[in-house]
Amino acid sequence: MNDDDTRRTRLEAGMKELETRMGQPSPLAQPLHKALLGAVFPLSTEQLVWLARENEAAPVVLSLVSNLPRRLFESLDAVLRELELQPAVGEEAAEPSMVPMQER
């Protein structure tokens, strides 16, 4: 076994241990990181959307960022946590809207 094989084996073992401790990374983490590359937090939702557009984010990521609550985010982790709290497509929101439906 050469040095590269030893390093690769140690890296794989380290990654498995990290995943065991912390769980699998969010599937949004990598595309969100790419979309918000260069961000200097805190940033508002509008600033996040602007940065994602500048970084040519994928349409789905841009849509997710655009639908974040209008507030100030302190970090990329805060953005990711908020996105994970958002209902998936087809799911109902955790709290129903208080706006009454209009009759047609």
Image (spheres, rainbow, N blue to C red):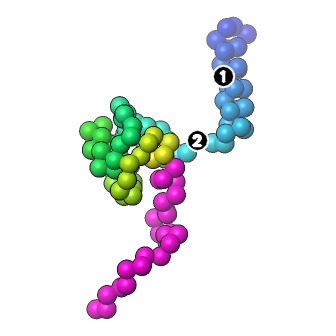
Rendered location of residue 45, percent (x, y): 34, 50
Q: Is residue 76 left or right of residue 40?
A: right
* 88 falls in the magenta region: yes
Which image quarter is the C terminus in? bottom left
Task: Give the magenta part as a residue range.
Answer: 81-104
Local crowd at mark 2 within 10 Å, few (<14), some, or many (≥20)? few
Image height of 10 relative to 28, above or below:
above
Q: Which residue is mark 1?
A: 11
99 is within the stretch colored magenta: yes
Residue found at x 63% / y 42%: 24
Q: Which residue is mark 2?
A: 25
Give x and y (percent) for residue 31.
43, 41
* Residue nearest the viewer, comparing 31 with 44: 44
Q: Is residue 69 left or right of residue 78?
A: left
Snapshot quadrant of residue 47: top left
Foreground of the two, 86 or 31: 86
Residue 63 visible to the viewer: no
Q: Describe the element under mark 1 as helix, strand or loop.
A: helix
Residue 27 in view in this figure = yes
